[in-house]
Image (spheres, grey):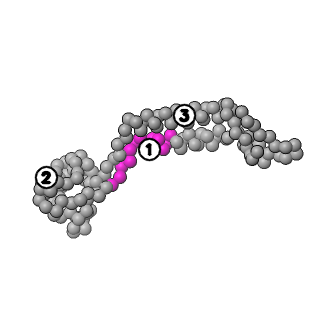
Amino acid sequence: MTSFSYPPGDANPHPSDSKLCVSSLGRLAVTVLVSIGLFLSGCSTMHGVAVPQQSGERIALQVGEGVHIQTKSGQSLSFKVIQIEPDTLVGKNIRVSFRDIDNIQVRRTGKVSKGEVIVVVVTVALVAGLVVLLSHGAIGFPAGPP
């Protein structure tokens, strides 16, 4: 382990900084864990979907997806798709013909693979181990320039 000390007569301007501050490490660990939690929960974002121009043309939606529709008359509608008919989207107590739709946005959640979960778990374990080592003084860093 390399250590650094100030020459005689030079005062360390931050004596508590002789090793990384444990509270800073705690904040870093919390930030990393919150970021990982958000990553694993998946992000829900809106994506534009092409409106079918001809009867029978397939739309890139699935039953169960949440949509936000802007009609040609300027009406804004949001609902969960419960059925897709050849020329109409159907939600609970609502039917919207494709010919009346100006814009469709679909709410999609990103999927997380097993490999990504494994990488995240290993990263969390490594960060936690590093925090423990640093907080117990097993690893030290000099506070100032050499």
Q: Quadrant of the N terminus?
A: top right
Q: Determine the residue positioned at 57% across, 32% down.
A: 129
Residue 90, percent from left and from top: 17, 53
- The disc at residue 12 is none
Q: Which residue is mark 1?
A: 38
Q: Mark 1 and mark 3 in contact (Cβ < 8 Å)?
A: no
Q: Determine the residue positioned at 75% across, 37% down.
A: 3
Foreground pick, 84 / 126: 126
Q: Quadrant of residue 30?
A: top right
Foreground pick, 121 / 70: 121
Q: Who comes first in sequence, dot 2 or dot 3? A: 2
Residue type indicated by callout 1? Leu
- Rendered view: 93 above or below 101: above
Name the secondary structure under disc 3: helix
Cα distance between the residues tagged 2 and 1: 35 Å
Q: Who comes first in sequence, dot 2 or dot 1? A: 1
Q: Mark 3 and mark 2 in contact (Cβ < 8 Å)?
A: no
Q: Is residue 119 magenta?
A: no
* In this rendering, position of residue 116 left or right of residue 51: right
Q: Is residue 42 magenta?
A: yes
Task: Please identify the residue farthest to the bottom as the structure is shown.
Answer: 73
Residue type indicated by callout 2? Glu
Q: Which residues are magenta?
A: 33-46
Q: Which residue is mark 2?
A: 85
Are there few (<14), some (14-19), or many (20+) residues within 10 Å of tag 2?
some
Cα distance between the residues tagged 2 and 3: 51 Å
Q: Who comes first in sequence, dot 3 or dot 1? A: 1
Residue 133, percent from left and from top: 63, 32
Cα distance between the residues tagged 3 and 1: 19 Å
Q: Determine the residue positioned at 40% across, 36% down.
A: 115
Q: Determine the residue positioned at 41% across, 38% down.
A: 116
